[in-house]
Image (cartoon, helix red, strand yellow):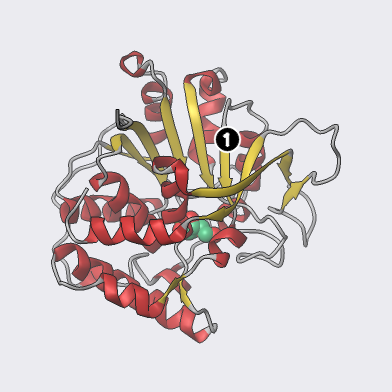
Amino acid sequence: MSEVLLSVPLVIDTDAGVDDAFALMLALASSRAHPLAITTVHGNVPVRQATQNVCLIQDVMGREVPVYEGASRPLLGEPLDATNIMGPDGLGGVTAWMQPSMRQKRASNAAIALTQWLRHRAYSAGITLVTLGPLTNLALALALQPDLPKHVTRLIIMGGTSEARGNASAVAEFNFFADPEAAARVLRAGFQEVWLLPWETSLRYPIPWSDFDALLFPENPRTQFARYITGYLRERLQGLGMPGLVLPDLWAMLVALYPECVRESVPVQASVEMEGALGRGMLAISWYQTSAEPNLHLVTHLDVGRGVEILRSILAGGG
Ligand code: RIB
Ligand code: CA
């Protein structure tokens, strides 16, 4: 009998940049996903813009998943942004020529919403939490509800560096660099099953430009949106000599919904450096300290051919 794949009850925390948008399009369209709630956080753009971006993405996908706005700044220090690469609105400037969404966020703050949704009794099979931005909301939720990890079946994180090849500093990836204290708190909170998609793994698997162009035909509202939001990022990645579109959050969502696409992962003990002018935000991995109890599965290789085919289906209007 063919394996019946139940849809995954999903909560998504996002800073709503370009790659977050592809991850959200996958989660909102895939028959394998049952998105329960989306929470927004500072990161690529200010949190208010992230909320507007999520509502716009739901317009494109025709979905009404509850949206909760969260932290506007990290636990310590000032918020960063990535508008230099994602565009002024985080989505390549698309909001300048698309109608603003009429959708409204819910009243609760994201941290409160996380404590409520992640302990929702209706989903005894367990909820998968996917984090695509700085971990401030989750860290605040843990402060409110320290036993939260026992309610979360799987935590999928896009963040950190596996080889200290930083994109936000010399050694730190943006989501962890934007709030190192939050990232450190989450990694030591005792979640049952953590899968981490680091920056270097997404660098290993860009979508070649010609392959991405082929995904944009035949045209429809989803492919047009995908074209609009990627123009600004494409110029910058090509200026950096990248051979294709780098979409870390999409690959993190692929791990969450299509775990068979994980070709290689390694259980490691990892923590986040919070001190140091050079090292702050770096993911420190105990590769050889065998006594160190693993706290996450580091995803190193993916079946991105399958991932591109799944993306093609979603953009073509499939699920
Ligand atoms: O470093 C890449 C991560 O930072 C991605 O999640 C991107 O959207 C930004 O949030
Ligand atoms: Ca993101």
**Quadrant assignment, res 191:** top right
**Left or right of 2 in this view: 150:** right
Q: Is residue 311 left or right of residue 276?
A: left
The answer, for residue 66, to whether it is visible in the render is yes
User: Is 317 drawn above or below residue 190 in the view shown?
Assistant: below
> Mark 1 is on which residue type?
Val
Q: Where residue 83 appears, x then y in whole percent?
A: 44, 69
In the rendered picture of this protein, how many numbered marks are placed on residues?
1
Query: x%, y% of residue 297?
Result: 62, 40
Q: Circle 1: is it few (<14), some (14-19), or many (20+) Cα within 10 Å?
A: many
306 versus 210 height, above or below = above
Residue of label 1: 194
Q: In the figure, 87 relative to 57: above or below? A: below
Q: Percent from the top left, x then y, of residue 27?
A: 31, 45
Q: Residue at x 47, y 67 (%)?
A: 246
Label 1 sits on a secondary structure element that is strand
| Residue at (46% x, 43% y) in the render | 260
Do we see residue 70 in this rendering? no
The residue positioned 48% from the left and 66% from the top of the image is: 82
Identify which residue, 293 or 98, lies in the foreground.
293
Ligand 1 near label 1 (Cβ, under 8 Å)? no
- Left or right, residue 64 beside residue 135: left
Q: Residue furthest front?
A: 1
Task: Identify the residue at image location x=24%, y=72%.
Answer: 216
Quadrant for the N terminus, please. top left
Measured as percent of width and height from the top left, residue 198 is found at 59, 54
Q: Is residue 34 above or below residue 275?
A: above
Between 230 and 114, the one lying in front of the other is 230
- Indicate left or right for 166 with 195 as reference: right
